[in-house]
Image (cartoon, grey):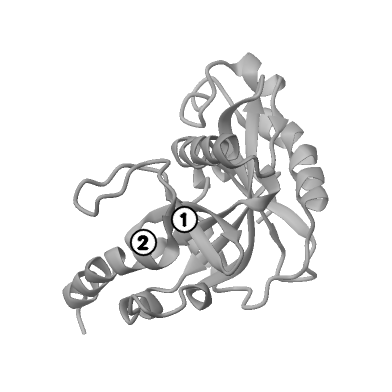
């Protein structure tokens, strides 16, 4: 998708995340610098697309904020396949369930505070990085809040973190690796599963709690 096509590009926002994961089985190599450069260049496009009618929906408090926007530390996207999650056993290594994708969130900041985001991904034609959508303010704020809280607690650099998406269950977690394990951080409270936003958990514990939900969802789908 070209970022300069029409204002409808803005409204597509981050619905692109799940479909694109299936388009690139092997993510091409990219660097944080590459992603930030592409996102930075797209700020002018974002400014052209944002209007009085949609700036709030995209997470901004005023049109003037769009003109002052900058790009924060990118957050690479990984995914968990629904079928693999449904078969997961607590004593299994959870790391093979986490599949890197070619997509990266680029937070859009105003005065250091998160307002919106971009999705940066390679094109299918030649792998050139492009911006596929703008928006998703609630999601990126929750992700960045969890990441910043963890950074304060652990002292890790922002680049250590990535997003883990379970798209079939509409769930996202901030994640980082420590020695031989992956740690996940819920971004929203969930009393039913005893998730607390900002609480660091082992990936195997998170996945074990999600398995019943995955099985119920599979049972509800028509065969």
Where does the image place residue 195, in percent across and percent down from the top left?
Answer: 30, 49
Vertical side of 91 occupied by 106: above or below:
above
Front residue of 124 and 158: 158
The image quadrant of residue 91 is bottom left
Q: Is residue 117 left or right of residue 188?
A: right
Vertical side of 36 occupied by 215: above or below:
below
Tag 2 and tag 1, C-beta contact below 8 Å: yes
How many tags in the picture? 2
Location of the C terminus (image quadrant): bottom left
Label 2 crowd bin: few (<14), some (14–19), many (20+), radius 10 Å: many
The image quadrant of residue 83 is bottom left
Residue drawn at x 69%, y 41% is 73
Where does the image place residue 1, in percent across and percent down from the top left?
Answer: 65, 56
Marker disc for residue 69: none
What is the secondary structure assignment of the residue under circle 2?
helix
Residue drawn at x 46%, y 30% is 57
Marker disc for residue 184: 1
Residue drawn at x 51%, y 49% is 14
């Amino acid at each position: 998708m070209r970022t300069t096509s029409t204002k409808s590009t803005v409204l597509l926002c981050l619905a692109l995340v799940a479909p694109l994961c299936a388009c690139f089985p092997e993510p091409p190599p990219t660097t944080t610098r590459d992603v930030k450069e592409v996102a930075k260049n797209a700020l002018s496009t974002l400014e052209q697309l944002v209007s009085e009618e949609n700036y709030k929906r995209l997470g901004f408090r005023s049109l003037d904020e769009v003109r002052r926007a900058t790009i924060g530390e990118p957050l690479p996207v990984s995914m968990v396949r629904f079928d693999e999650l449904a078969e997961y056993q607590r004593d299994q290594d959870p790391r093979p369930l986490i599949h890197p994708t070619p997509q990266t969130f680029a937070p859009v900041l105003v005065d250091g505070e998160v307002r919106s985001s971009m999705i940066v991904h390679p094109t299918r034609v030649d792998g050139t990085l492009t911006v596929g959508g703008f928006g998703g303010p609630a999601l990126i704020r929750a992700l960045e809040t969890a990441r910043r809280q963890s950074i304060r607690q652990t002292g890790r650099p922002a680049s250590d973190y990535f997003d883990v998406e379970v798209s079939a269950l509409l769930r996202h977690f901030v994640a980082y690796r420590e020695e031989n394990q992956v740690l996940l951080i819920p971004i929203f409270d969930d009393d039913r599963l005893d998730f607390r936003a900002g609480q660091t958990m082992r990936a195997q514990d998170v996945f074990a709690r999600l398995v019943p939900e995955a099985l119920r969802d599979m049972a509800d789908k028509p065969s």
